[in-house]
Amino acid sequence: MVIYRLPLGLSVNAPKRSFCPQCKTPIPMWLNLPLVSWLYLRGKCKACGKPIAFRYFAVELLTALAFTALWMMFGPGVPEVVFFLWVLAALLIAIAFIDAEHMIIPVRLTWVGTVVGLAGCAVWPRLPVMAGTAGNWLSGLMQGGIGWAAGFVGLGIVVELGKLAFGKKELRFDEPVAWSLREPQADEDPMWFVIDGVPFAWWDMFNRKTDRLLVEAADIQVDGESVGGGLLTIREMEILLPDGSIRRLAKLKALDGTATRAVVPREAMGAGDGHLLGMIGAFFGWSGVLFALFCGCLIALGGALIGRIGFGKQLPFGPYLALGAVAWMFGGWKLFAWYVQFLGPLGLS
C-alpha cells in the first residue's frame, strides 16, 4: 500500500481501506489477509477480475521473512532492539521497490527511519558500533548522529560534485528532429520531454530551481501555432521563448517543434540516495555507511557485468544501498571487523 500510494501523492491513511488499483473498489477485510488472500483470489480482483500485481504478494512474503530472520538473530539476546530493526527492514523494502519502479526515494520515509534509528542507538548503544566498542546511551546516540552525517553529508558532497561534472547531457543532430512535451497518460506517468523519440522524465531533469532545459529549435509550435525558431529555455513551471516572452506551462495545451540541439539537465546521483544513506548511518554508524555504500556499488557492478543493468543507463541506486544495509545487518559488520583487524596498524581501532 505504501509502495503504491506514496509515489502518487496519495495519503496512506485515506482512504483507510485498501482498494483495487484497477477499479478502485474497496477490498473487504476478509479478502485483505496478507499472502492468503492473494493466493485465494489467484492474483485477481474479486470485483473486476483484473490482475493484482505479484509485487503485493512478494512484498508481504519478503517482509514476513525479514521480520522472522531478525527475531531469530537478535531476539534471543537483545529483544529490545528488534522493533527498531523491524521498522528499518520495512522501510528498506518500501524504498527499494519505490525507487526501482519510479526512481525516486520518498524522503518522508528516510526521515522517519532516521529518528527511529537514533532512538535505537540510544536503547542499544552497540547498534551503531557493532564492529567496535559500545558505550552508554549518549555515546550510542552520538555514534548514530555521526553515522547520519557521514551518509547524508558525505554522499551529498558526492552528488554536488557529480552534478558539476556530469550535470548536463548535450544532444546534437545534423538535421532538425522532432521534439515535444508529452503529458502523462496515467497517474503513474510523469511529464516527458521527447526528442528524436528519446524520452526524458520531467522529475529527473528538474531537481533544482536552477535546472534549465535548453533547446536550439528550428521551429517552435505553441498550442499548434508556430512562433519561429531560436533558443528555447524550459524551466520546471514555465518556458522562455526566443523573443523574451514567458509562458506558464500550466496554461499551454501543446508544445513541440523541431530542433538541432538540446542540453538536458540531469543528476549524477539522486538526492534521495543521500537521505537513504543518512538513515542507514543513523542505525549503523559511519562504518555501516561505508559498508552499505561499498557493498551496494559491488552489487550494482555485478548486475552490470552479468548483463542485467546496462552501463551508461539510468540506475536506481536505492535498492542496492538497501541490500548493502541488509548485508551489514545480517553479519556484514563481522566482515568489516575482520578487514579492520587484517589491516593491523593501518586499521581503525
Image (tube, rainbow, N blue to C red):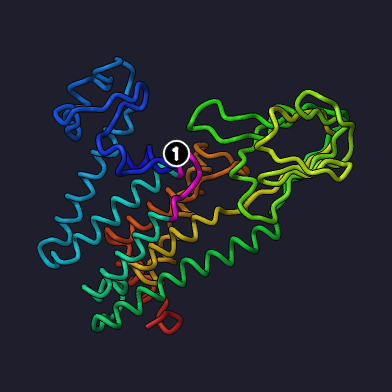
Q: Which residue is mark 1?
A: 8
**Residue type pointed to by label 1:** Leu
Question: Residue 190's x, y, as percent?
Answer: 56, 36
In the rendered image, residue 33 lying in the magenta stretch gets the answer no
Identified at 43% across, 54% down, the residue is 321
| The quarter of the displayed image where residue 227 is located | top right
At a point 64% along the width and 46% down the height, the residue shown is: 205
Q: Alpha-carbon neighbours of circle 1 within 10 Å: few (<14), some, or many (≥20)?
A: few
Quadrant where the image shows the C terminus: bottom left
| Residue bounds of the magenta highlight | 99-107
Residue 207 point in image, percent of width and height: 61, 52
Residue under the point 74% across and 45% down: 213
Observer-nearest of 198 and 133: 198
Residue furthest left as drawn: 76
Is 86 situated above or below 17?
below
Give left or right: position of 202 versus 320: right
Residue 36 image point, x, y percent: 16, 29
Above or below, comparing residue 232 to residue 147 in the picture: above
Question: Along the horizontal axis of the image, is 208 left or right of 218?
Answer: left
Secondary structure of the residue carrying tag 1 is helix
The residue sitting at 44% across, 42% down in the picture is: 9
